[in-house]
């Protein structure tokens, strides 16, 4: 898209996020098959009951949308091995300049801090060179592992959206968290690595749980 920088791979240590390419569909498909049970509770579903697109069609759609500046779709790799995805969607430019970030990691790589690092890398790119102002992450209240990710990174709790996203066959409430550019002048990754994340930003008040 005009005026926006190229989307390039980003890395910290053993963790790399690289823009999805058409040829990634085989690795993605194998990983989704392998993690079917692991992911089912947290995956979006079609409210009309249509089956999800196959991996090849999904990757083609994401690559096209990325070329149009509508999404940022990354493969996450650990030591070069495909480990999951981070996707920035619902991008609004102009006066909103906001987007939503979603993620998953293969069960084989869970608990290693892969997604906090990958999310920080992508958010820093989106709020920096990509010039967005705000990044949002919405999570089902039951998803304790994902709530830990926003706690670790200090995304700020904003509220609860009722029956917000169709997940695992039902409209599900979501807790929403965000950061704006001014909150992280040093960057999300640097704040995470230096242990300067605000301790209670992601706390969810009792009334919203
Ligand atoms: C949520 C998710 C992305 C976290 O990614 P991650 O890279 O494992 O993140 P972390 O390493 O920081 O671990 C986060 C928490 O997961 C939990 N966890 C750790 N190892 C785990 C394992 N083997 N299995 C399940 N949960 C585990 C722990 O509570 C951990 O918090 P802690 O570090 O304070 O102990 C990952 O669990 C996942 O992909 N889950 C399925 C899909 C999903 O929920 N996507 C997000 C929808 S909003």
Image (cartoon, rainbow, N blue to C red):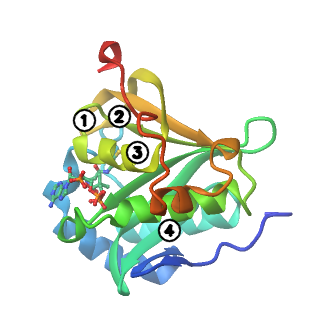
Where is residue 151? Give x, y as percent: 38, 43
**Disc 1 to disc 2: CB gap under 8 Å:** yes
Q: Determine which of the numbered discs, if any, sits on residue 23 in the image.
A: none
What residue is rendered at 41% in x and 35% in y?
202
Label 1 sits on a secondary structure element that is loop
- Name the residue furthest right: 3
Q: CA distance from mark 3 to mark 4?
A: 19 Å
Residue picked out by circle 4: 74
Would you say residue 48 is visible in this rendering? no
Q: CA distance from mark 1 to mark 3?
A: 25 Å
What residue is rendered at 45% in x and 50% in y?
153
**Disc 4 to disc 1: CB gap under 8 Å:** no
Quarter of the image with the N terminus in it: bottom right
Earlier residue among tags 3 and 4: 4
Residue picked out by circle 3: 150
- Name the residue furthest left: 37
Residue closer to the observer: 180 or 201: 201
Residue picked out by circle 2: 166
Where is residue 40? Give x, y as percent: 20, 49
Q: CA distance from mark 3 to mark 2?
A: 21 Å
Of labels 4 and 1, the one closer to you: 4
Of labels 2 and 4, the one closer to you: 4
Earlier residue among tags 3 and 2: 3
Earlier residue among tags 2 and 4: 4
**Disc 3 to disc 4: CB gap under 8 Å:** no
Q: On the rendering, which quadrant does ligand 1 occupy? A: bottom left
Q: Residue 26, relative to residue 94: is it above or below?
A: below
The picture quadrant where one finds residue 81 is bottom left
Q: Residue 78, relative to residue 87: is it above or below?
A: below
- Name the residue furthest top: 207
């Amino acid at each position: 898209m005009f005026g926006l920088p190229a989307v390039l791979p980003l890395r910290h240590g053993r963790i790399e996020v690289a823009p999805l390419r058409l040829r990634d569909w085989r690795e993605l498909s194998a990983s989704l098959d392998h993690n079917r049970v692991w992911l089912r509770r947290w995956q979006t579903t079609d409210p009309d009951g249509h089956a999800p697109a196959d991996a090849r069609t999904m990757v083609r759609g994401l690559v096209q949308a990325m070329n149009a500046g509508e999404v940022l779709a990354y493969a996450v790799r650990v030591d070069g091995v495909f480990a999951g995805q981070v996707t920035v969607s619902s991008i609004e430019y102009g006066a909103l300049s906001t987007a939503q970030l979603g993620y998953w990691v293969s069960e084989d790589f869970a608990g290693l801090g892969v997604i906090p690092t990958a999310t920080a890398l992508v958010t820093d790119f989106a709020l920096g060179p990509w010039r967005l102002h705000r990044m949002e992450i919405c999570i089902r209240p039951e998803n304790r592992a994902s709530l830990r990710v926003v706690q670790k990174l200090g995304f700020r709790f904003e509220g609860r959206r009722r029956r917000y996203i169709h997940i695992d066959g039902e409209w599900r409430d979501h807790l929403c968290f965000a950061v704006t550019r001014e909150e992280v002048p040093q960057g999300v990754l640097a704040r995470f690595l230096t242990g300067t994340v605000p301790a209670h930003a992601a706390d969810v008040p009792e009334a919203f749980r």
